[in-house]
């Protein structure tokens, strides 16, 4: 008699036990950051900014952390603002995946670094 009464959102599975409702899917962390490298195949490096007040000195501190994220279609480019989500470990360092590109970078990526050669005269 008890097994005959099922709630609307729980359907029995093959073993006869009620399945978990779809609302109890585990929440995954999400971060927004800037792509700083896209040189690897299907992998991007995202720099995420975290701002917090220092516990002792009360000054606002900015901390940056790099995350390696999986980009299946190689669509994110350097300078893009992206949303990444935590996933199962895909390699030794990569356990995040690209969800969406929030804002595309309109400037072309800088090649090389530093001066443009004015000091080499």
Image (cartoon, helix red, strand yellow):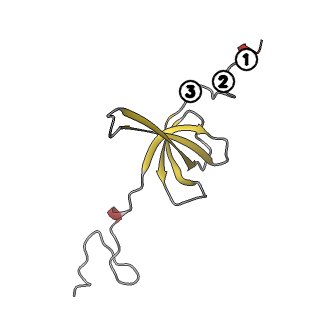
Extreme residue toward the top, this view: 121
- In the rendered image, which residue does mark 1 sit on? 117
Near mark 3 (Cα within 10 A), the count class, few <14, some 14-19 or many ≥20, is: few
**Can you tell which of label 3 and label 1 is closer to the viewer?**
1
Front residue of 120 and 47: 120
Report which residue position mark 2 lands on.
Answer: 114
As drawn, is 63 to the left or to the right of 4?
A: right
Up-down relation of residue 5 to residue 36 (above or below): below
Classed neighbour count for the residue bearing mark 2: other residues with Cα under 10 Å, few (<14), some (14–19), many (≥20)? few
Checking the image for residue 106, the label placed there is: 3
Instruction: Check the picture and name the quadrant holding the N terminus.
Output: bottom left
Residue 18's quadrant in the figure? bottom left
Q: CA distance from mark 1 to mark 2?
A: 9 Å
Question: Where residue 97 appears, x then y in whole percent?
Answer: 53, 51
Using the rendered view, name the quadrant where residue 117 is placed: top right
User: Residue 50 at x, y = what percent?
Assistant: 42, 39
Dot in front, 2 or 3: 2
* Residue at disc 1, secondary structure: loop
Mark 3 or mark 1: which comes first in sequence?
3
Identify whether 121 is placed above or below 83: above
Q: What is the spatial separation of the Cα atoms under label 2 and label 3, in whole angstroms?
A: 21 Å
Kind of element beneath mark 2: loop
Q: Residue at x 39, y 84 (%)?
A: 15
- Give the residue drawn at x 49%, y 44%: 100
Considering depth in this image, is 19 or 83 the residue closer to the camera?
A: 83
- Disc 3/disc 1 C-alpha distance (Å): 25 Å
Q: Kindly identify the residue that appears in the image at 63 percent across and 29 percent down.
A: 109
Say which residue appears at 52% left-offset and 60% top-offset.
88
């Amino acid at each position: 008699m008890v097994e005959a009464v099922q709630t609307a959102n729980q359907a029995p599975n093959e073993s006869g036990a009620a399945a978990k409702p779809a609302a109890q899917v585990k929440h995954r962390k999400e971060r927004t950051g800037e792509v700083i490298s896209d040189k690897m195949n299907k992998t991007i490096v995202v720099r995420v900014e975290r701002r917090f007040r220092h516990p002792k000195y009360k000054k606002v501190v900015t901390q940056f952390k790099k995350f390696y994220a999986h980009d299946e279609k190689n669509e994110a480019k350097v300078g893009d603002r992206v949303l990444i989500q935590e996933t199962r470990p895909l390699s030794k360092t990569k356990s995040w995946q690209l969800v969406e590109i929030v804002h595309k970078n309109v400037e072309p990526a800088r090649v090389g670094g530093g001066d443009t050669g004015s000091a080499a005269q």
